[in-house]
Image (tube, rainbow, N blue to C red):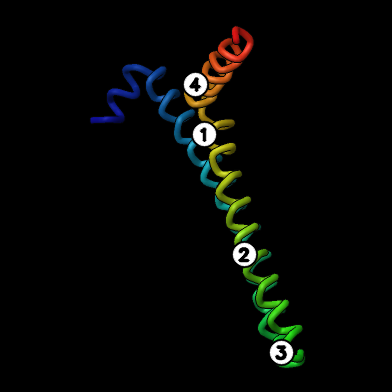
Amino acid sequence: SVRELQKANPEIARQGSDTNEKATKMVLILGLLFLTFNTVWVLMLIYYLVTRDDQDHEQGSRNNSMMKMLTYIIMSINSAVNPLVYMSRNEEMNKYVKRSISRVTNVICNL
């Protein structure tokens, strides 16, 4: 069984525990980012819907355009931040990015 193998080799059990801890932290970080960005968006949407009836057509059209723009901005920021979180939390990905940046820098410097 798995428990017997872990007792026989505690190093394997510790590595599995470290991996689970890292994965849990990454899920929490991504979840908090998702909640933060979406909470802001939902609050903006509620404000837009509540104030929409009180405005004339021109102002409402302007607010509609602003709401769309802010939605795109928030979604873009969230999408841009997620890879940075993965990169900072995953050692293999972090090493790959550093190697890639080093290669690109070498190519640019040798031009």
Crowding near the residue tagged with mark 3, few <14, some 14–19, many ≥20 C-alpha atoms within 10 Å: few
Q: Residue at x 31, y 18 (%)?
A: 8
Q: Where residue 84 appears, x then y in whole percent?
A: 59, 37
Query: What amino acid is labelled 1 in the image?
Result: Lys
Q: Where residue 39 appears, x then y in whole percent?
A: 64, 65
Lateral position of residue 56 relative to residue 2, left or right: right
Q: Of 79 and 107, which appears nearest the observer?
A: 107
Q: Which residue is drawn at 71% across and 89% down?
A: 57
Where's the C terminus, which quadrant?
A: top right
Q: Residue at x 60, y 15 (%)?
A: 108
Q: Where residue 22 appears, x then y in whole percent?
A: 51, 34
Lateral position of residue 94 relative to residue 54, left or right: left
Query: What amino acid is labelled 3 in the image?
Result: His
To which residue does mark 4 refer?
96
Q: Of 111 and 16, which appears nearest the observer?
A: 111
Among the two numbered marks 3 and 2 on one chain, the one whose residue lies closer to the N terminus: 3
- For the residues labelled 2 and 1, the Cα–Cα distance comes to 31 Å
Mark 1 or mark 4, whichever is nearer to me? 4
Total numbered circles: 4
Among the two numbered marks 1 and 4 on one chain, the one whose residue lies closer to the N terminus: 1
- For the residues labelled 2 and 4, the Cα–Cα distance comes to 32 Å
3 and 4 marks in contact (CB < 8 Å): no
To which residue does mark 3 refer?
57
Q: Of 89 and 48, which appears nearest the observer?
A: 48
